[in-house]
């Protein structure tokens, strides 16, 4: 027998358990990236993979479990008025997104293993199975944002939205990270690849969370939160390496393919005098643009806020990259720099517009 208050309490507890599982999954992904950079990939069953997919399994079970409970309630004549049916399962739109997103991530795992069996053990963040897994993660993160709207109406909503938004932004950070190598490889206008992709993706995440939470300060809160998460990822990786003492095989992998993404990451780190996988620079770059977005007010003047963020991101990232010895050969000419700034501005406006439209739709369905 179900009590009327149980579904809301269940949903709230499930949301925080889901966010905790995703944080652990983020630790696993971050550690996995460092593992590939400093150890190499010897097996699918490496420790960070296990950590990641245990967390993914937990997130999937949590979101699916809520749908199962809601489905059973509906069959006993106690369907929630805000639940919808998809593939025989009933639940809120938020939990459906959370579950189906995790299902996509799970599907990506065997595809990733097959990919490496067919094409080798080298890794790039932009391989099809990795993109599939990250896309599924983002679908689920959008679900978390929607759940926060569904289950909270008070101050706790801001906290839940901020936590979900940090995870959404963090996955976009991972997606954009690879673009620094595009600047290294091609130079010129491509020097701004990271800024352009970031202007599109980061603006979307920051603007969406701000509009959903009705909070002018949300963009800066998310940027700071994502930086703290990255710091925790480095700590988790350090602890994991200290406990396991894995045997590095990265030098042989680099010698076998000096043009691989891992080899380029090592070469760039060497030229910059950095340790591969430990730099926080790319997480520091969005802080000033996010602060400027907050000042511009994403609630009342979203176009100005989005445009300011995109231009500031391009300028700040260019200022940082100009100081990197690894990119000294890839500097843009003045005309190319103008093109990069214009495209970054356009990308930020597209990201902001998309966020505004999606935020309106999510609020209507919460």
Image (tube, grey):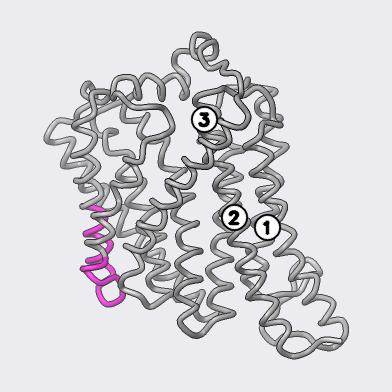
Crowding near the residue tagged with mark 1, few <14, some 14–19, many ≥20 C-alpha atoms within 10 Å: many
Q: Residue at x 36, y 68 (%)?
A: 218
Cα–Cα gap, marks 1 and 2 = 7 Å
Q: Which residues are magenta?
A: 294-311
Q: Which residue is mark 3?
A: 124
User: Which of marks 3 and 1 precedes in the sequence?
Assistant: 1
| Contact, mark 1 vs mark 2 (Cβ under 8 Å) | yes
Answer above or below: position of 3 versus 235: below
Disc number for residue 22: 2
**For numbered disc 3, what is the local secondary structure?**
loop
Instruction: Please name whichever residue, 321 or 349, is drawn nearer the observer in this view of the structure.
Output: 321
Cα–Cα gap, marks 3 and 2 = 22 Å
Q: Is residue 241 left or right of residue 209?
A: right
**Main SS, magenta residues:** helix
Crowding near the residue tagged with mark 2, few <14, some 14–19, many ≥20 C-alpha atoms within 10 Å: many
**Quadrant of image for the C terminus:** bottom right
Answer above or below: position of 278 versus 23: above
């Amino acid at each position: 027998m179900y009590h009327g208050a149980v579904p809301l309490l269940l949903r709230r507890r499930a949301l925080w358990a889901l966010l905790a599982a995703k944080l652990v999954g983020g630790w696993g992904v971050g550690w996995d990236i460092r593992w590939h950079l400093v150890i190499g990939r010897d097996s699918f069953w490496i420790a960070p993979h296990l950590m990641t997919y245990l967390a993914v399994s937990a997130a999937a079970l949590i979101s699916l479990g809520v749908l199962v409970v809601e489905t059973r309630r509906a069959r006993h004549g106690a369907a929630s008025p805000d639940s919808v049916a998809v593939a025989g399962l009933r639940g809120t739109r938020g939990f459906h997104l959370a579950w189906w997103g995790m299902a996509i991530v799970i599907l990506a795992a065997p595809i990733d293993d097959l990919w490496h069996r067919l094409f080798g053990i080298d890794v790039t963040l932009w391989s099809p199975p990795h993109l599939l897994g990250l896309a599924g993660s983002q679908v689920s993160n959008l679900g978390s944002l929607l759940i926060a709207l569904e289950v909270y109406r008070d101050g706790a909503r801001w906290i839940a939205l901020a936590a979900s938004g940090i995870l959404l932004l963090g996955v976009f950070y991972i997606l954009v990270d690879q673009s620094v190598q595009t600047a290294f490889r091609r130079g010129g206008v491509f020097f701004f690849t990271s800024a352009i992709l970031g202007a599109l993706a980061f603006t979307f995440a920051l603007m969406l969370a701000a509009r959903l939470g009705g909070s002018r300060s949300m963009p800066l809160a998310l940027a700071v939160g994502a930086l703290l998460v990255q710091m925790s990822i480095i700590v988790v990786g350090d602890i994991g390496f200290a406990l396991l003492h894995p045997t590095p095989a990265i030098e042989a992998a680099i010698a076998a393919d000096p043009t691989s993404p891992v080899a380029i990451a090592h070469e760039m780190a060497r030229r910059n005098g950095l340790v591969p996988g430990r730099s926080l620079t790319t997480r520091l770059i969005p802080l000033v643009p996010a602060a400027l977005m907050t000042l511009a007010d994403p609630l009342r003047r979203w176009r100005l806020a989005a445009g300011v963020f995109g231009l500031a991101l391009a300028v700040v990232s260019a200022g940082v990259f100009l100081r990197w010895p690894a990119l000294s050969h890839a500097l843009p000419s003045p005309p190319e720099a103008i093109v990069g700034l214009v495209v970054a501005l356009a990308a930020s406006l597209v990201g902001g517009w998309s966020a505004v439209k999606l935020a309106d739709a999510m609020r209507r369905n919460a």
